[in-house]
Image (cartoon, grey):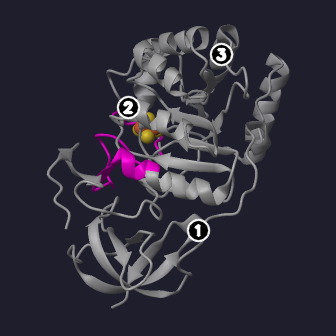
Amino acid sequence: MVEAHLRVQGRPLVRIGCDVDVPLIGAIAFGLIDRGTNVIQVRPISLCVLNCIFCSTDAGPKSRYRQAEYIIDLDLLVEWFKEIAKFKGDGIEAHIDTVGDPLLYNKIVDLVHELKNIREVKVVSMQSHAPTLTEKLADKLDAAGLDRLNLSIDSLDPNLAKYLQGTEWYNAKRVMEVAEYIVKNTRIDLLLAPILLPGLNDHEIPKIIEWGLKIGVGKKWPPFGIQKFIRHKYGRKPKGVRDMSWREFYNYLRQLEKKYNVKLVCTPRDFGIHYKPIIPYRFKVNERVRVKTIAPGWLKGEVLAIPLGRVCDRVITVVNASNIPLESKITVRIIANKHNIYLAEPIA
Ligand code: SF4
């Protein structure tokens, strides 16, 4: 039974491995995700302190759709990661990405260190807007073995950045200082990953490229990973953003490639990403499964559940479950299972 003693940003913080035991495969908001490549996504925490106006995961204090946040015990996370790594074999990239900001994980340095010491792991990388990153923490992450930081910085103009990050205290100049420190003083490879919001920050993208080239980002991997804005069902949709087709997006990148003589259109191969067999699926779409509800789901109306009477190493998110209390035994129908991320609905 979950006893979510802590509340953060007005929502319960579910401490997995402490308040409740939940399988670390099967959910989008926490744990481990294997999408059938050599990359394993690592999600130790779901929290974020920013409120980016384009956030695809509706993170931060102003979240409208979330009802719970998660943090995972370090030893439990590493134990589960090792099991997957053993299955996948050598040449793994552990990519700490999360639906929030991984730097908020209190044991982030230990996590990087532990992942880096796993025999099958070749690369440890992380994705963050890094509002809380300091030179001292960067040094620790470097010593722990972080190979690459994908730094999301969407504007160099401090006022526009505050607006885009939806946060008055966000300090783009400070993030730039730490980025420059990383390039000069650590072995961490820096990749700049701004999101292109046509109509809002298109004029900032060339400036970000110029700044990145000046400080020397991307020594081992491509220096930039410019992202296209995509509208998500529960994501934020900023006003004033013009929709852009994929063709227009790539044309835009190719023009900038010519102008700055730098690679901007990247493929998985540029990052050493390749196919590797996916870990076994446990449930098929349309399958009926008897489950027990064990913890609040990530979004409103959802609850987390585990299967009853069979192997219990995948968590299932049950939707349309507002009226189902925890500890209930119910039957659900699996409605999605892509990459072992399981969604189900109750059967009346
Ligand atoms: S885009 Fe990233 S940094 Fe911004 S609110 Fe969402 S999770 Fe946080």
Residues at marks 3 and 2, CA–CA distance in whole angstroms: 24 Å
- Determine whether 277 is above or below 64 in the image: below
In the image, is 259 to the left or to the right of 315?
right
Q: Nearer the viewer, mark 1 or mark 2?
A: 1
Question: Foreground: 293 or 301?
Answer: 293
Question: Foreground: 5 or 254?
Answer: 5
For the residue marked with disc 2, what is the amino acid?
Gly
- Determine whether 274 is above or below 164 in the image: below
Q: Earlier in the sequence, mark 1 or mark 3?
A: 3
Q: Is mark 2 within 8 Å of ligand 1?
A: yes
- Image coords of residue 197 (percent x, y): 58, 35
- Assign ligand 1 to one image quadrant: top left
Can the viewer see residue 243? no
The residue that disc 1 covers is: 338
Q: Is mark 1 within 8 Å of ligand 1?
A: no
Q: Residue at x 68, y 19 (%)?
A: 209
- Image coords of residue 288 (percent x, y): 45, 89
Disc 3 crowd, CA 10 A, few/some/many (<14, 14-19, 20+): many
Secondary structure beneath dot 3 equals: helix
Disc 1 crowd, CA 10 A, few/some/many (<14, 14-19, 20+): few
Name, please, the residue furthest toward the bottom. 348
The residue that disc 2 covers is: 166
- Image coords of residue 62 (percent x, y): 30, 42
For the residue marked with disc 3, what is the amino acid?
Gly
Toward which corner of the image does residue 94 lie, by quadrant? top right
Over which residues does the magenta segment extend? 49-78
For the residue marked with disc 1, what is the amino acid?
Lys
Q: Is residue 73 magenta?
A: yes
The residue that disc 3 covers is: 212
